[in-house]
Image (spheres, grey):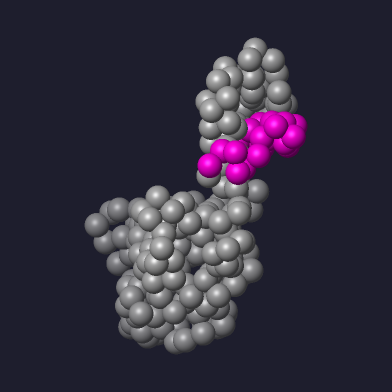
Amino acid sequence: MNFINKLFRKSRSKPNGIFCENLEKIIEFEPQSYAHYYRAFMHSSMQEKDENGSDLNYERLEFLGDSVLNTVISSYLFKHAPQGNEGYLTVMRSKIVSRKHLNLIGEELGLLKLLMRNIPDHQLGKNITGNIFEALIGAIYLDQGYLFSERFIQKCLIDKYVDLNELEKRVTSYKSLVIKWCQKNKHEFEFCTKVDNGCDEQQHFSVCFYIDDEVVSKARETSKKRAEEKAAKRAYYALQNEIKTKALNI
């Protein structure tokens, strides 16, 4: 019998009073099956297996929760932005479900304190709270259905963070912004990125951003994507007298 089945011999049993008490404070209802939620907070470092021998952790629920979240937000935008075309709706949805938003919500809900893991916090990754938030949505969907999931997302995300007028002004990708500016104004540009571990245990990347063969900005991060985005953001502010959002037709 696998780990979760041992804990949940009955669907409404409460094998861990502290876990269930903290969980119910977050979701504000009593689950039909605590097993879904226990799995949502199981990190892969626990190395648990299900009855089929497959890895038992939050990652499958994260995938499901991501799909439910996107459906709920798409529906919200379809109703509340009737004049928006497909491109507008897609951009706005990406702003709403950004990792920054989801990580912030996960932190505010205190999800990390419920996470079962065998590694220290600094090894969990920068997006762990957002990942768990999506897994929790997946658990709610399996336990209570779509309408409960929709209400949870409305309360935790939409009511707190969705202001369409403000979101329209928010830049989500400085890299796209500076690339469009360079292309429109016929400037040559290049992101020169290389692995740069230095004295760090974790792999890092260094990037130099060139415009017309001149270095405009530099950055260093733990992923190539983040390093290039940081360099682009620095370039944007360094050139802010020339780069204007309106001129980019965004």
For this rendering, which residue is in front, 99 or 168? 168
Q: Residue 146 in the image: x percent, y percent?
A: 33, 75
Q: Residue 82 in the image: x percent, y percent?
A: 39, 67
User: What kind of secondary structure does the magenta stretch mostly adopt?
Assistant: helix
Residue 241 in sight from this viewpoint: yes
For this rendering, which residue is in front, 65 or 92? 92
Residue 233 in magenta stretch: yes
Q: Furthest residue to the left?
A: 52
Q: Residue 87 in the image: x percent, y percent?
A: 40, 50
Magenta region, residue range: 229-249
- 193 vs 116: above or below: above
Q: Quadrant of residue 68?
A: bottom left
For this rendering, which residue is in front, 250 or 212? 250
- Residue sitting at 61 percent across and 61 percent down? 166
- Residue sitting at 53 percent across and 32 percent down? 180
Q: Furthest residue to the top?
A: 213
Query: Which quadrant would the N terminus be assigned to in this image?
Result: bottom left
